Amino acid sequence: MKYRQLGNTNIRVSTITFGAWAIGGWMWGGTERKDALEAILASYDYGVTSIDTAPIYGQGLSEEIVGEALRTLPRDKVQILTKFGMRWNETKGQLAFSSADNSGRPIDIYKYAGKESIIKECEDSLRRLGTDYIDLYQIHWPDSTTPVAETMEALVQLLRQGKIRAAGVSNYSADLMAEAEKTINLASNQVPYSMVERSIEKELVPYCLKHNKAIIAYSPMQRGLLTGKIRPDHVFAPGDHRPGTVFYQPENIRRIDNFLDRLQPLAHSRNAVISQLVLRWTVEQPGITIALAGARNKQQAIQNAKAAYLALTPEDIKYIDGELRSLKLVGEEAAAY
Ligand SMILES: NC(=O)c1ccc[n+]([C@@H]2O[C@H](COP(=O)([O-])OP(=O)(O)OC[C@H]3O[C@@H](n4cnc5c(N)ncnc54)[C@H](OP(=O)(O)O)[C@@H]3O)[C@@H](O)[C@H]2O)c1
């Protein structure tokens, strides 16, 4: 495994970090707790020391499963990245969207990052995770109803109290980061980034490179599509959000699969599978610090961790970039979540 410094902090994180959204089940058509736990533990065996989760993932369930894993892992060798600001049990802030929890009950989700709310959320996360500190605490989505300074003041307080080791943001623009930096020294920004979703390259990547901020790439396999296993007639479990996103429209699945077919000979020659080429390409891009790789079970987790061990040369990356240039997708923006 390769480890990198998280922006300007002294925290070292694994370039392949475990993404714990899908194991929360919510928006992913359910979860298998035993598989999820095995996935986290197997990742650690292959050098994945960092885990990204959030309270909203399964409305506490993902953090609880991570907490269960933490009981058997050495706490000082693991980095826990979690978030705040997506409330399902509070009606303040800005309504983000309506959804259903793992039992099918309707829930309304609010983007809310008021100071008192963050302090409470932090205590709840610490309890679910069974730990007394969080390595990186990130605002999940911008909250247009709360001044950025108020949100950042809460993080300053948590830093002072030692409840969090570093503060980060997620889904923030470069401008919002600059505003937040008037109050706090941010470590990172967690944003969508994959071979087919590269919008951050224009403004955010240059900003983060200039200011030494880590970029944490989320959905690097475009939620499973960039493994090559999804066909246009793929049947998803009820409640799985993926078919509603632009990348999963049948025409885009077809085009992406054709592109991935052209990478097969390279993968084969490196004794690798497509998802490993994809993850490795991601963490080799300028400004990208780590990739959050979601996995539902041990097999996926090990395969993803092994991407870090792949021998991929600069020529290989150039070859992939060349193939990528001829990939054109239909539709405009990716769905936000
Ligand atoms: N900050 C944010 O707003 C935000 C948003 C999204 C994600 N994230 C973070 O980023 C993490 C990763 O993103 P993501 O989970 O959206 O997408 P992803 O990592 O691109 O894809 C994960 C999904 O792909 C499938 N998969 C993973 N490894 C595989 C393998 N080796 N072979 C075949 N299929 C495989 C699994 O789903 P199936 O088996 O069901 O296909 C898995 O749940 C999340 O877990 C979360 O921590 C953050």
Image (cartoon, rainbow, N blue to C red):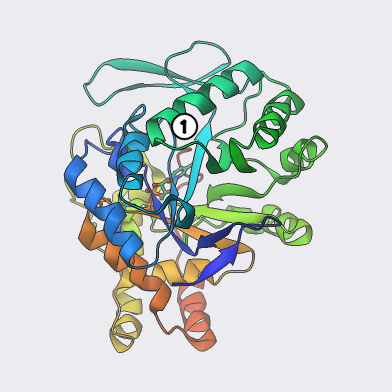
The residue positioned 18% from the left and 39% from the top of the image is 237
Q: For this view, does 35 lie left or right of residue 28?
A: left
Quadrant of the image containing the C terminus: top left
Q: Amino acid at mark 1?
A: Leu
* The one of 108 and 188 positioned closer to us in this rendering: 188
The residue positioned 45% from the left and 38% from the top of the image is 131
> Residue 310: x and y, percent?
39, 80
> Residue 96: x and y, percent?
50, 23
The residue positioned 42% from the left and 73% from the top of the image is 308
* The one of 27 and 62 positioned closer to us in this rendering: 62
Q: Residue furthest right?
A: 182
Residue receiving disc 1: 126
Q: For this view, does 266 lie left or right of residue 296?
A: right
> Residue 125: x and y, percent?
45, 30
> Residue 2: x and y, percent?
49, 72
Q: For this view, does 78 lie left or right of residue 120?
A: left
Give the vertical position of 328 relative to 239 (above or below): below
For numbered disc 1, what is the local secondary structure? helix
Q: Quadrant of residue 306?
A: bottom left
Decide if residue 226 is in sight here: yes
Give the vertical position of 258 relative to 204 (above or below): below
Q: For this view, does 42 lie left or right of residue 110?
A: left
Quadrant of the image containing the N terminus: bottom left
Q: Quadrant of residue 31?
A: top left
Count of number-bearing discs: 1
Q: Around disc 1, counting alpha carbons within 10 Å, would you say few (fewer than 14), some (14 to 19), or many (20 or more)?
A: some
